[in-house]
Image (cartoon, helix red, strand yellow):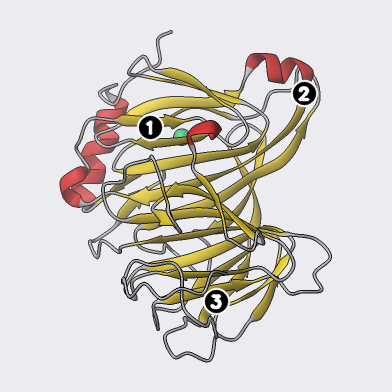
Amino acid sequence: MKKEKTGKESSNIIDNPDETNSNYRSIKLVIKSNETPEGDGFVVHRSFPSGSIRNLDPFLLLDEMGPLDLLPYESKGFPEHPHRGFVTVTYMLEGRFEHKDSQGNSGKLGPGDVQWMTAGSGLVHSEMPEKEFAENGGRLHGFQLWINLRKTDKWIKPDYQDVSSTRIPQVSTPDGKVSAKVIAGNYLDAKAVINTLTPILYLHFTLQPGGQVVQSVPENYNAFAYVISGEGLFGKDKTTVGEKNLIVFENDGEIISIREPDNAKSPLDVLLIAGMPLNEPIVQYGPFVMNTREEIDKTLEDYRNGRIGKINF
Ligand code: FE
C-alpha cells in the first residue's frame, strides 16, 4: 500500500495502516449464507434477509447465485416476476443470463457484466440463462443485491444501467497485491461509471498474500463484506473468515480493513459493499418494497390488474 498522506476525507490511502487505530471498524456479526431455492429450480446462497438480519439499510437482500452447473438444455433461472420500489443489481461472475421486461427492454449479461436496474414504479421481468449458453450447459455464478430507494424515488420511471465488464474500472495498489473492480463508488483513483441515487460503494477485491485493503467509509454508512473464495482477516480484531460468509461491520469507525495473510495458500476474493442508510419505514411484500401497508395493498392491486406490466415479446 502506498504511504501517502493526502489529508482528504475521501482518500482510500491511510498512512501507517494499523488496526490498533481507534478509527478502525470492528465486526458486528459473521453469518454463513444459507442455501435457498429461488425462482425456477435455482439455488442461491442467501446472506440476508435471514433469522439474524432483516436488512442492512439501505440494503434489503444479498444472494450469491449458485454456483450452479447446468447440463446441456437444462434451464434454471428466474421466470417472469415483478419488482417495485427498489434497485436490483446483478453481477455475473460465470455463465450468461438474458433478461426481458414489460417495458420492451432486453439484454444479455456475461462474466464481469453488471446490470443496475432501478425498478422504481415497477416492472415485470425475467432473468434466465441465455439460449446458446443453456444449449451447451455450464456454470452460472453471480450476485444479486437489492438496494432500497428513498420514498421520493420509489415512483420514478424504471431505469437500466447495463455495464459490460470492459467498462467496469479496474485498479491495483502500487504493490500489486490488491486489485479492485469498481462497480459503485470509488477506490484509489478509479471511479465507477454507474450512477447511484444515494451513496453506494460496491467493490470486488482480489487480495494476494500480504495484501491489505484499507477503505474509508463514513461512520454512519452500513457496510459488509462477502467472501467469494479464500480466507482473510477482517476488521479491527483481524477476525479470520472464509468463503460463503457475510461479515457485517460495526458503525464504530471510518476505516475498514481487510487483510490477506502473508502465508495464505490462495488469493482472497471478496465483495465490500456500503451505503448511506435511508432511515425510512420499510414495508416489504416479496418483490415489492414500500413505506406503508397501504402502498403495498395498492401495489398488489396494481399487479393483479396488470398495471405493473406484462412481457409481451
Ligand atoms: Fe428480478
Q: Mark 1 vs mark 3: which is more N-terminal?
A: 3
Residue at image position (30%, 64%) is: 277
Q: Which residue is mark 3?
A: 29
- Residue 307, label in figure: none
Report the front residue among 5 and 268: 5
Q: Which residue is mark 2?
A: 137
Report the front residue among 48 and 185: 185
Q: Residue furthest top?
A: 313
Dot 2: element: loop
Residue at image position (36%, 42%) is: 87
Report the front residue among 245 and 75: 245
Please identify, in this view, whether the residue under mark 1 or under mark 2 is nearer the observer.
1
- Could you say where residue 309 lies in the image, as x and y percent from the top left? 31, 21
Please identify, in this view, whether the residue under mark 1 or under mark 3 is nearer the observer.
1
- Could you say where residue 210 lies in the image, as x and y percent from the top left? 71, 71
Residue at image position (42%, 48%) is: 146
Dot 3: element: strand
Disc 3 packing (10 Å; few <14; some 14–19; many ≥20): few
